[in-house]
């Protein structure tokens, strides 16, 4: 059972496009991330075609899903702008060739330094989530004699129906300002120099498989736009966020045509320029995490496949109870399956990639591919247990390249300093 056409068995060995994952593992070691350019391009084109079909809009890739420069550059080359949530991500987008005007700077709680960065680099739009941010950006921009396009992120109090940790549009979530307070905040913003509050921004959550919550959220945005226009605030831009889910468990994937139909009938007649910010949808299916089995431990009640990737490489299973398909890199011969927990070497009970998963028999030394790991995988990596960050590989056809090297232990440990007032380490 292949994952998709770009990750499938060729002569019994899983390949990413034209590159054998087995050969890659021999060359780069494990664990490693491997991404398919073709999948990224396919997903981008699907999204772009759906947007064009409903009348057009800009696509700003939500960089936090996978912020590797090569991934951003791939999407920028296809025509995407970038949605960033920190100065670091803004710098990545610029370094990958995204034009400043095509960058939207979102996120809760920006520091003054980040707002200065946005102003001095001519970032296209800044989405703010509090009065404090509006006042600081106003002061920073006015002091430099520029006017910044500003969106205010509203919280429409809509249940996106996703895992609690990736729902962002309910009143109890920290994101945005309460939509009922929005008119007062826009009025305040409109009176400030240096900022032009012409955009409404909304993002209700991630991994939505049911498109219905968008309908309610976008309807609330539309009524807000009418209310603001009546109050003399000319809204010209809408930023509709991201959140389209992917079928990790083989669910029926959401139809982009349904999504854009909702957009068209809720906000399509407002005459606003639309921005979409897909993250997961563009990159999740493009990546696998490849690891090698270290040991198979048969306990009293469970069998544990211990392999060399951990929650430090892919935290989604333990953080979000997320499911990722797992496939042996070498195609199994028989049909026998065994129910196992796939765990990492980290000293945490929560360190698992899958629990109670039926997999073909695995032996120490075998390679596995954890699929649909291109989004919120490598970017959420940590070095807990002093585990160096894994390399990332980008494949295009028969060609592959390191797009991030494996972090060396020297680099990792070398960040630490022992103060002079502690005993010197003995190196004898
Ligand atoms: C995370 C985020 C996105 C992207 O979400 P996905 O679920 O990956 O599509 C878009 N916009 C904002 C403001 C975000 O924070």
Image (cartoon, rainbow, N blue to C red):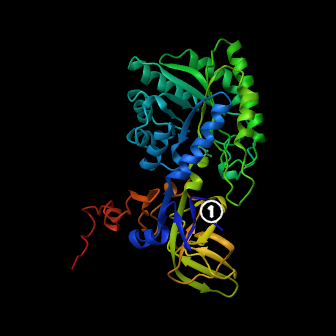
Query: Mark 1 highlights which residue?
Result: 3
Tell me: residue 189, above or below residue 341. above
Place residue 175 in its image quadrant. top right
Assess disc 1: are there few (<14), some (14-19) or many (≥20) residues with their C-alpha within 10 Å of its C-alpha.
Answer: some
Question: Would you say residue 220 is visible in this rendering?
Answer: no
Residue 353 vs residue 176, the one in the foreground: 353
Residue 188 vs residue 393, the one in the foreground: 393
Residue 58 image position (x, y, % from top left): 57, 31
Residue 187 image position (x, y, % from top left): 62, 17
Identity of the residue drawn at 59% across and 79% down: 305
Which residue, as the protein is rendered here, is positioned at the far front? Answer: 11
Place residue 106 in its image quadrant. top right
Residue 100 vs residue 332, the one in the foreground: 332
Ligand 1 lies in which image quarter? Answer: top right
* Tag 1 secondary structure: loop
User: Which quarter of the rendering shows the C terminus?
Assistant: bottom left
Question: Would you say residue 322 is visible in this rendering?
Answer: yes
Tell me: residue 83, above or below residue 410. above
User: Which quarter of the rendering shows the N terminus?
Assistant: bottom right
Residue 83 image position (x, y, % from top left): 52, 38
Count of all numbered marks drawn on residues in the image: 1
**As drawn, is 89 to the left or to the right of 337?**
left
Identity of the residue drawn at 64% across and 76% down: 341
Q: Does the beta carbon of the residue at mark 1 sit less than 8 Å from ligand 1?
A: no
Tell me: residue 201, above or below residue 255. above
Identity of the residue drawn at 67% across and 58% down: 248
Residue 31 image position (x, y, % from top left): 47, 69
**As drawn, is 47 to the left or to the right of 114?**
right
């Amino acid at each position: 059972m292949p994952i998709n056409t770009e990750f499938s068995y060729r002569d019994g060995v899983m390949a990413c496009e034209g590159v054998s994952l087995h050969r890659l593992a021999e060359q780069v070691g494990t664990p490693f991330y491997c991404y398919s350019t073709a999948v990224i391009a396919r997903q981008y084109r699907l999204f772009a075609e759906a947007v064009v079909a409903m009348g057009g809009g800009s696509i700003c890739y939500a960089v936090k899903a996978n912020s590797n420069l090569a991934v951003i550059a791939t999407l920028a080359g296809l025509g995407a702008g970038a949605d960033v949530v920190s100065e670091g991500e803004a710098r990545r987008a610029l370094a990958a060739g995204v034009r400043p005007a095509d960058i939207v700077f979102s996120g809760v709680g920006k520091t003054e330094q980040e707002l200065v960065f946005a102003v001095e680099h001519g970032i296209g739009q800044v989405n703010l989530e509090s009065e404090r941010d509006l006042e600081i950006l106003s002061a920073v921009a006015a002091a430099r004699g520029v006017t910044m396009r500003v969106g205010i992120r509203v919280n429409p109090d809509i249940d996106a129906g996703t895992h609690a940790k990736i729902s962002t549009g309910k009143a109890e979530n920290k994101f945005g300002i309460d939509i009922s307070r929005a008119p007062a905040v826009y009025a305040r913003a409109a009176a400030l120099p240096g900022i032009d509050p012409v955009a409404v921004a909304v993002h209700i959550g991630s991994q939505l498989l049911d498109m219905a919550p968008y309908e309610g959220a976008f309807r609330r945005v539309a009524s807000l736009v009418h209310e603001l226009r009546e109050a003399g605030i000319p809204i010209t831009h809408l930023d509709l966020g991201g959140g389209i889910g992917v079928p990790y468990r083989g669910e029926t994937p959401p139809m982009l045509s349904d999504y854009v139909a909702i957009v068209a009938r809720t906000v399509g007649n407002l005459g606003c320029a639309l921005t979409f910010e897909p993250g997961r949808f563009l990159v999740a299916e493009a990546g696998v995490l490849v690891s090698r089995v270290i040991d198979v431990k048969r306990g009293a009640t469970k069998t544990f496949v211990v392999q060399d990737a951990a929650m430090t490489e892919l935290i989604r299973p333990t953080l979000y109870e997320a499911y990722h398909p797992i496939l042996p890199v070498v195609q199994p011969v028989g049909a026998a399956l065994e129910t196992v927990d796939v765990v990492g070497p980290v000293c945490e009970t929560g360190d698992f990639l899958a629990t109670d998963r039926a997999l073909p028999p695995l032996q120490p030394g075998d390679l596995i591919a954890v699929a649909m790991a291109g989004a919120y995988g490598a970017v959420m990596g940590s070095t807990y247990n002093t585990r160096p960050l894994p390399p990332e590989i980008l494949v295009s056809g028969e060609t592959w390249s390191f797009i991030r090297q494996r972090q060396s232990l020297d680099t990792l440990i070398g960040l630490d300093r022992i103060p002079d007032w502690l005993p010197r380490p003995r190196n004898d």
